[in-house]
């Protein structure tokens, strides 16, 4: 599982101009099952996406297709983690630590 942290690198006017394309991109990846949750950071200086993917390379390639990344208005920081404990809704994504 991955946490994708976005940090805005441009004024909010440029972010807002790309927001409809970014939301469409998010919806596409929710529909495919890749994204589990997302939202703005508070204060509004970026956002967070929780995603599942086969590899870090795959999620980094996916992040590069975000209109925010392509428009050079946000940078991504990708953190991989092993979800050993979850709420019931995320039980299908639980993992065990490697031996």
Image (cartoon, grey):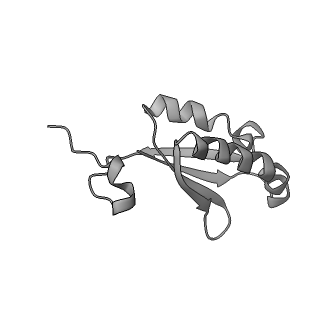
Q: Is residue 37 left or right of residue 94?
A: right
Quadrant of residue 44 within the rendered picture: bottom right
Most foreground residue, 36 or 18: 36
Determine whether 78 is above or below 47 in the image: above
Image quadrant holding the C terminus, namely top left
The residue shown at (68%, 40%) is: 66
The residue shown at (56%, 39%) is: 32
Q: Position of residue 40 (x, y in %)?
A: 63, 63
Q: Position of residue 85 (x, y in %)?
A: 28, 58
Image quadrant holding the N terminus, namely top left
The residue shown at (85%, 52%) is: 17
Quadrant of residue 75 within the rendered picture: top right
Determine whether 60 is above or below 36 in the image: above
Q: Position of residue 19 (x, y in %)?
A: 78, 53
Most foreground residue, 33 or 95: 33
Count up the numbered dots.
0
Q: Position of residue 18 (x, y in %)?
A: 81, 49
């Amino acid at each position: 599982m991955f946490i994708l942290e976005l940090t805005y690198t441009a004024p909010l006017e440029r972010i807002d101009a790309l927001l409809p394309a970014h939301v469409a991109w998010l919806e596409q990846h929710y529909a495919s099952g890749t994204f589990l949750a997302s939202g703005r950071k508070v204060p509004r200086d970026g956002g967070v996406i929780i995603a599942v993917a086969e590899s870090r390379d795959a999620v980094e390639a996916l992040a590069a297709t975000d209109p925010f990344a392509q428009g050079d208005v946000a940078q991504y920081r990708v953190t991989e983690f092993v979800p050993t404990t979850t709420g019931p809704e995320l039980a299908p994504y639980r993992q065990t630590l490697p031996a």
